[in-house]
Amino acid sequence: MKNKTFIIAEIGNSHNGNLKYAMNAIDNAKRAGVDAVKFQYIKPEELVHPNLKPYNPISKLKSQLEKFKKITLKLKDYKKLSKYAHKQKIKFGLSIFDLSAIREVRNIIDFYKIASGDIKFNLLIEKITNTKKSVIISTGVSDYNEIKKMKFKNNVSILHCLSKYPSNSSDLAMATILKLKEKFKKNKIGYSDHTNGYLSCLCAVSLGAKIIEKHFIINYKNKLLPDYNVSIDTKDFKKMVMSIREIEKMLSYEKKIPNKNKMTIQRSWYARNEINKNTILNEKNCIYLRPYNKKGINLNLKKKILSKKKNK
């Protein structure tokens, strides 16, 4: 299908540092019909301060640094995952969070992803966009007034997003997609979702989003997986992909094509009974009925004909 929506399964860190799970997730994402998978290449020491507390106040871990060290994979692992994804004929992307990672992953990815929190990390954005590779950037911590002042190169796709886990429907401001399309005409506009379903993704496609990124898990069994509450599993992801493809069909033609059977459901003016010559035609002796009769009286001419005599 021409100009189809590019659908990304954000596997992220749901693998919990388990390479086997990550590969299994790629298999399942492929079955769901995605165009790409994406992971997060994190070097914990280059992302968070050692004293930064965990998001979850009741966590047994002392810091986010400790958490990331437990769940991240190494560069060698992402090289294996890239090769595996390409073998499955789906594209492979990575979110990166430090300058040295740009060069490290360049030859194994199809696209870079810049997280919402780094939208003001100008040096990172500049160096990534200079690679000429496809770049996707999320805008989850910025309002429209901030975003519209920014300048993006043509190889950058911009995703409307809300960095709230999970996001409420009333907070999504989906009409922002229309504003972004109007402002950044040379860039692809998409949507990165953090709700606990996928209805907003369907809404985004209906509004013209050309990229959809949604958190993916294999199944709903392990509620302790990272990003569990904003993820959907293989079965629901497949339903989402199929729904998006149906919406694309609905939007594929701008020209309205009339039903081929329109003659059978349109009406003409018929005589109720046999009408004698010189009888005045009116709504007492005529009736509107299906089908349309080319040899009959067109409804649009009815006013001109009404009260005239039948003289044949």
Image: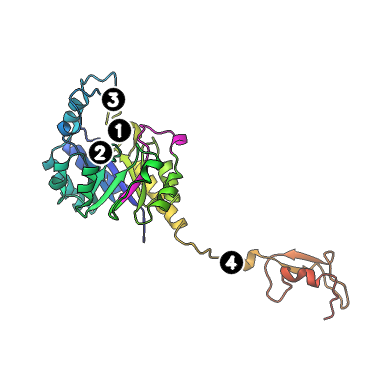
Q: Residue at x 53, y 65 (%)?
A: 257
Q: Give 36 or 174, whichever is nearer the viewer.
A: 174
Residue 55: assigned label = 3
Task: Please say if 142 is above or below 32.
Answer: above
**SS category of the residue bearing label 4:** loop
Give residue 123's position: percent from left, percent from top. Answer: 21, 43
Q: Are marks 1 and 3 in contact (CB under 8 Å)?
A: no
Q: Are marks 2 and 1 in contact (CB under 8 Å)?
A: yes
Q: Which residue is mark 2?
A: 12
For residue 160, which quarter of the picture? top left
The answer for how far apart the CA atoms under marks 1 and 3 are is 12 Å
Badge 3 marks a residue whose secondary structure is loop
- Residues drawn in magenta: 157-172
Residue named by callout 4 = 261
Which one is earlier in the sequence, the residue at label 3 or at label 2? 2
Mark 1 Cα-neighbour bin, 10 Å: few <14, some 14–19, many ≥20:
many
Q: Is residue 85 visible?
A: yes
